[in-house]
Amino acid sequence: MTDKESQEGLTVNVNLPTQAAVPHGHVPELKSTGFAYLIWAFAGLMGAHRFYLGRPHGVTMLILLLGGIITVPFLIGLVPLLVLSIWVLVDAVAIPKWVEESRAAALAPVLSPVVEAQATVPAAPRAPSLPPATAAAGTGSLRMQLLKAAVEKGGELTVTEGVIATGKTFKEVEDCLKRMVDSGYVDIDNRPGSGVLIYVFAELRD
């Protein structure tokens, strides 16, 4: 058998990981900013919005409310009720960010099999590798991916959309976007209607 025939008869089997853990067509339940504010408006003093978004201290808010109502006749209850009212107002500012974090956590199981598949595919033989890439090069690559995602989204991008587009973690995407904001290339705004925090690429807007 010649060298040419042996090369033509050689086959390579690559076992790619399956994604059986994530059912086909499965869409995780994503929290709604509008619904979170609706709960906050009608039951915020009871900490209902914290229960909905999976945040801690919802029980603490409920205890403060009940304790304040019971002790109001003795005027002592005015203190916990005042503290609770301020607390609820502060929560209103944090709700959009909590919704983003909740959505990123819900999407993590869907994105992880894709990342694992990319990590487990054996690399093909290649020439001697170049020196390891610097941290700045990795940051530039993520920045380019986010810019491409922003173009597809009409110049507006949320952290969750950036995670979906790049496969990076929530923290990596958020840190990269914040650096772009600090550089003056990106602005921060809230999406009308939902209040979700968005990063605006003014030069890329339709």
Image: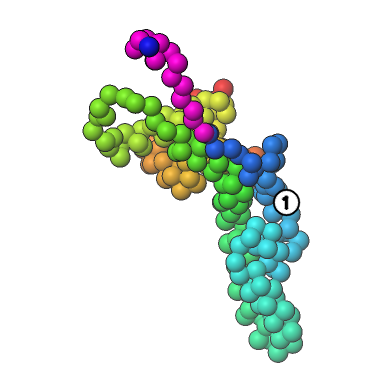
Total marks placed: 1
Q: Position of residue 104 (x, y in %)?
A: 57, 47
Residue shown at 70% from the left, 89% from the top: 74
Foreground: 72 or 172?
172
Q: Is residue 164 above or below residue 45?
A: above
Quadrant for the N terminus in the image: top left
- Image height check: is 180 above or below 129? below
Q: Quadrant of residue 58?
A: bottom right
Q: Position of residue 76 (x, y in %)?
A: 65, 86
Residue positioned 62% across, 57% down in the render: 92
Q: Is residue 81 above or below residue 168?
A: below
Q: Is residue 79 visible?
A: yes
Residue range corresponding to the magenta coloring: 2-15
Q: Residues within 10 Å of mark 1 (few under 14, many from 20)?
A: few
Q: Position of residue 18 (x, y in %)?
A: 59, 37
Identified by mark 1, the residue type is Phe
Per the image, the residue denoted by label 1 is: 35
Q: Report the quarter where the C terminus lies.
A: top right
Q: Residue 124 at x, y = what percent? A: 38, 27
